[in-house]
Image (spheres, rainbow, N blue to C red):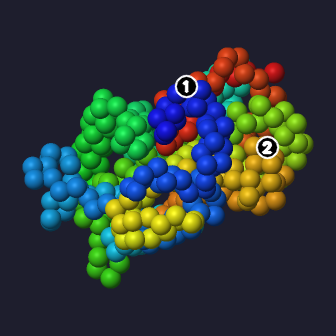
Amino acid sequence: MLENLLTPETRADPYPFYRQVFDRGPVLKLNDRFFVVSGFEEAAALLRNPAFGHPEPEVLPNPHENEPVDEQGRVIRSFLALDPPDHTRLRRLVSKAFTPRMVERLAPRIEELAKELVGKALAMGEFDLMEEIARPLPVTVISEMLGVPLADRDRFAGWSHAMGRALDPSFLIAAETVAAAVAARREFVAYFRELAKERRERPTGDLFSDLVSVSDEGDRLSEGELVITAMLLLVAGHETTTNLIGNGILALLKNPAQSRALTEDRSKIPNAVEEILRYDSPVQLTTRTASRDASAGDEAIGAGAQTVVLLGAANRDPRTHEDPDRFDIDRSSPRHLALGQGIHFCLGAPLARLEGRSVFEALLGTGRALRPTSDPVWMKQVTLRGLESLRLEFA
């Protein structure tokens, strides 16, 4: 059933398929070992339930030199893919460096960068939103935060894209996609190992220097944890915000009355960002494994069973959202799961929201309307929903 997610029609618009799944039950049992969750309350409860987590990291008997492992030979994963207590420890350490105050201080620079990119696009007349604005903004911001040289940012974007494509459930990924992601991960690791050496010798006051030195009662990130955390921040900070911008502009283009309302009253931008996250989430699904016998909705789920949580479907649950398929920037406090729930709620949520608001402010600030010059091209993946290309011109 889930292979339907791979068709071009579903990639362009997965929501009719999601409704078919939801209509069969907000928690759908495919067999004793596999469940699909599409209801909002059921998904939110599952994501908060400690009985649902992630399998133990794989043990590598002969790891590649750029495949970090711990003392037991387990692959070092980001805290996004770990359960407590490992998750708790790593997230606490990273949170000491990646603080809301740090994000707040970045606001002027992000607004300046958004205006600069939009100004260049305006001078071009016709441009690709993804190529000229949606991708460069977040990768530049997170690279500057980490203290990465400007010349290396294109490489990061390529590595990030390759790894993002491998976030789909394993049964939906082609072997060549996995191979490209593994190669990108190893190049990331090699790069950040060298950068870590430099920052230990000469701290520069950036986020990566803070991560190198961060401590909690003597506890520090190991070298492997450090490089994997930096990689997570780059991939997560780049891919999801890129898709937020692209999906949001496309939604406004398809809903001109909403676009006019936003142009007339830019104070609505923060609420519009939340509605974009609900309406066309940059992250469409996530997976969890039951660590013990548990339940979701009315379904009993045995230990070891897998669940696919369709975040995009949950965000359009008609029991939770009135007229859920309508894009409405005036929707009162749009509830959504686009940024996660529970212990894995997105650490970078304030940064993503700030970047999204800054781009929409800059585009609306031109006083010029946008119109598409060709059909949008969607990326060929499922977990992350975003555009490969969206060619536009200023009217």
**Circle 1 residue:** 8
Compared with 95, 326 (above or below) is above
| Farthest-out residue, left | 62
Q: Residue at x 66, y 44 (%)?
A: 19
Query: What residue type is disc 1 on?
Result: Pro
Q: Residue at x 88, y 47 (%)?
A: 265
Is 11 placed left or right of 223 in the picture? right
User: Residue 369: x and y, percent?
Assistant: 81, 28
Compared with 136, 376 (above or below) is above
User: Residue 118: x and y, percent?
Assistant: 68, 33
The picture quadrant where one finds residue 16 is top right
Compared with 324, 166 (above or below) is above
* Front residue of 177 and 267: 177
Q: Secondary structure at mark 1?
A: helix
The picture quadrant where one finds residue 102 is bottom right
* Front residue of 103 and 382: 382
Please tell me how crowded label 1 is: few (under 14), some (14-19), or many (20+) other residues with Cα within 10 Å: few
Is 281 placed left or right of 253 in the picture? left
Q: Which mark is residue 226?
A: none
Query: What residue type is disc 2 on?
Result: Arg
Q: Secondary structure at mark 2?
A: loop
Q: Residue at x 29, y 66 (%)?
A: 221
User: Residue 178: x and y, percent?
Assistant: 31, 36
* Front residue of 385 and 15: 15
Is 384 placed left or right of 262 in the picture? left
Cα–Cα span, label 2 and label 1: 22 Å
**Circle 2 residue:** 326
Q: Is residue 110 visible?
A: no
